[in-house]
Image (cartoon, grey):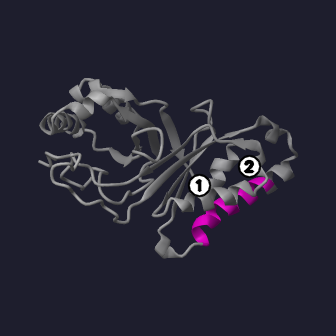
Amino acid sequence: MMVDLDPSGQVTGRESDRSNRQFMNYAFFKLDPAFRRLPQAERDEIRAEFQAAAEGWVSDAPAQKGLILRPYSLVGVRGDVDFMLWRIAFDVREFQEAQARLNRTRLMGYLTQPYNFVSMNKRSQYVNRVDGSGHGLEVLPGQGQFLFIYPFVKTRAWYDLTPHSRQGMMDEHIHASVPFKGVRINTSYSYGIDDQEFVVSFDSDYPQEFVDLVHRLRYTEASMYTLQDTPMFTCVKKELAGVLGDLG
């Protein structure tokens, strides 16, 4: 078990951890329908310009920066967003560079960002096996055809529980998830850097399996300490050209 008997570090006086970690940015975009009234040739040119700017953030950077971009379409599955760019970097300032590139394109004049989540990867205090858990120190993004995402906040009462109580509930939570082999969880942390406490994303090829997993987890004791787990996004993995083509 990985029961942390001093999660606040006040008893042991643990030093701060400045190790290099991955930051996550889940950037959601919504298109103004006015874009679809432009001539076809102009729309094609604008989409190509945006694609070059988005992909150039990765291709123009040295490989050692470890920049990762994964595009997803939400056209037809959610009304308030049309696509999402999952960006991963070891420096949160890289997300500013990525967005600045997009802001200089004409398509951004037709786009708004209803949601934009920032989080950081780190080792889970409740999971002692990294293999297949998605709670390790580096995320393996975009493994499934679908990515299910939601911001997550625990109640304050959760932090008032003893470490053993929390570990016991999480053991039940993890055990309930074991049969769902086709779903891989990526948990990232937003304490102090965004409004939510976590951003949780699930890679899978099987939406039906994810629905059954979430349903089962509603019956675990830990779910009683959930304050917020919406909005929930069903994202379909596509090449960026396909994502932009869905816009019309």
Q: Position of residue 30 (x, y in %)?
A: 67, 39
Q: Is residue 127 magenta?
A: no
Neighbour class for label 2 at 10 Å: few (<14), some, many (≥20)?
some
> What SS does tag 1 mark?
loop
Q: Main secondary structure of the magenta part?
A: helix
In this view of the protein, which residue sits in the foreground, 209 or 228? 228
Q: Is 54 on the left-hand or right-hand side of 228?
A: right
Image point (25%, 34%), residue name: 159
Q: Hey, which quadrant is residue 165 in on the image?
A: top left
Q: Can see residue 217? A: no
Range shown magenta: 46-60
Q: Residue at x 27, y 24 (%)?
A: 224
Foreground of the two, 33 or 119: 119
Residue beneath label 1, please? 239
Residue at image coords 68%, 60%: 101
The quarter holding residue 111 reads top right
Q: How many marks?
A: 2
Q: Is residue 153 above or below residue 85?
A: above
Instruction: Name the image quarter holding residue 113.
Output: top right
**Crowd rating for badge 1 (residues with CA inside 10 Å; few <14, some 14–19, many 20+):** few
Left of 211 or right of it: where is 178? left
Which mark is drawn over residue 108? 2
Give how far across and how far down residue 127 sits, in percent: 21, 48
What is the distance, in whole Å, between disc 2 and disc 1 at their CAs? 19 Å
> Is 234 or 22 nearer to us in this picture?
22
Specify the amino acid type for callout 1. Answer: Glu
| Percent coordinates x, y for residue 63 in the rendering | 50, 75
Q: Is residue 50 magenta?
A: yes
- In the rendering, at what x and y percent does residue 11 appear? 15, 49
